[in-house]
Image: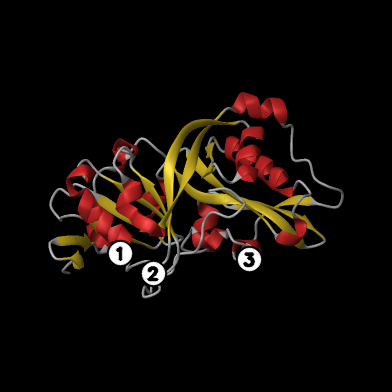
């Protein structure tokens, strides 16, 4: 198959790859931040799109997860900075808002100018997990009367009235249950909150959290988070958490659970382009990310 050329203006071109070409991307291991959501795209675990500046030894790559998260990285981002900026600014592929991270090796470049008025800058926080701190603060989920923690079934996997749904991160329910699954706070058969595996590789698991609107303010998010962390530790997995710094609810919850800030990084929200047919949902509501 012939790669797709995305022409931004004369002389400025990026190449969109087919899935069987994703392995040509620069090594993710060289990026000093959490990149599990991008790895999931490159390994074919979830839908996504991939662009590079050239097929042979790309200097830079841009990957967009089907849920809207994206990353620009590579050993030569500075060499193709104008091309990348034009590609991202034009955003003809973008059907919904995109949440962009930049390889920290290149965050000194003037991304605010390169991305233009369509970009809104935030700060993304990466955490490390301190199990001793978690143990000192939590002996188990604390639930309001009548609520209980249950393993997530297929109905919770595909809830339609929440912003962060597990079904957006996995090919199907079977893959979800194989790679970590999730838990729910349930009362009289009704799900109030859920915590789940958003990505999982080797010995770590990134946690997603969501509370349904009608049940917020009852401590359910904390309860399911504690239960999911206990589930990770019982399986020998390190829990991973990341969120916007501006998402104070998620930030405070993470810190109360034994997560310690390790990095703060620039993070851009790029407005959708109406002409695009690619849909990516907003992955950063109250429940983290």
Secondary structure under tag 2 reads: loop
Residue pointed to by mark 2: 273
263 or 40: nearer the viewer: 263
Quadrant the N terminus occupies = bottom left
Question: Label 2 crowding class (10 Å Cα cut-off): few <14, some 14-19, many 20+?
Answer: some
Vertical placement of residue 107 versus 181, above or below: above
Q: Do the numbered discs 2 and 3 sit on residues whose CB atoms are within 8 Å?
A: no
Residue pointed to by mark 1: 90
Q: Which dot marks residue 159? A: 3
255 or 38: nearer the viewer: 255
Q: CA distance from mark 3 to mark 1?
A: 33 Å
123 or 192: nearer the viewer: 123
Q: CA distance from mark 1 to mark 2?
A: 8 Å
Name the residue furthest right: 145
Q: Do the numbered discs 3 and 1 sit on residues whose CB atoms are within 8 Å?
A: no
Residue drawn at 29 percent across, 41 percent down: 109
Q: Measured from the top left, where is residue 39 in percent x and y?
A: 37, 49
- Looking at marks 3 and 1 on the same chain, the residue that comes earlier in the sequence is marked by 1
Q: Do the numbered discs 1 and 2 sit on residues whose CB atoms are within 8 Å?
A: yes
């Amino acid at each position: 198959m012939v790669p797709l050329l995305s022409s931004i203006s004369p002389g400025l071109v990026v190449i969109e790859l087919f899935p069987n070409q994703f392995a040509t991307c620069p090594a993710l291991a060289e990026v000093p931040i959490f990149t599990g959501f991008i790895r999931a795209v490159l390994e074919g675990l979830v839908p996504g799109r991939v662009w590079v500046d050239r097929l042979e030894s790309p200097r830079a790559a841009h990957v967009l997860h089907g849920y809207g998260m994206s990353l620009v990285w590579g050993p030569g981002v500075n060499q193709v900075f104008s091309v990348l900026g034009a590609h991202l600014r034009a955003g003809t592929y973008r059907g919904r808002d995109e949440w962009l991270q930049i390889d920290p090796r290149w965050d000194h470049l003037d991304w605010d100018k390169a991305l233009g008025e369509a970009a809104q800058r935030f700060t993304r926080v990466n955490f490390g997990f301190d199990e001793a701190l978690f143990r000192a603060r939590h002996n188990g989920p604390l639930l309001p009367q009548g609520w209980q923690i249950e393993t997530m079934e297929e109905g919770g996997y595909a809830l339609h009235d929440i912003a962060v749904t597990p079904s957006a991160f996995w090919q199907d329910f079977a893959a979800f249950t194989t790679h970590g699954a999730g838990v729910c706070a349930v009362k009289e058969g009704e799900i109030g909150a859920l915590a789940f595996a958003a990505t999982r590789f080797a010995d770590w698991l990134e946690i997603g959290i969501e509370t349904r609107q009608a049940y917020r303010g009852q401590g359910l998010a904390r309860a399911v988070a504690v239960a999911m962390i206990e589930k990770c530790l019982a399986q020998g997995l390190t829990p991973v958490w990341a969120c916007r710094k501006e998402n104070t609810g998620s930030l405070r919850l993470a810190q109360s659970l034994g997560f310690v800030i390790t990095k703060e990084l620039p993070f851009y929200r790029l407005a959708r382009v109406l002409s695009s047919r690619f849909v990516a949902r907003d992955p950063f509501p109250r429940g983290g990310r």
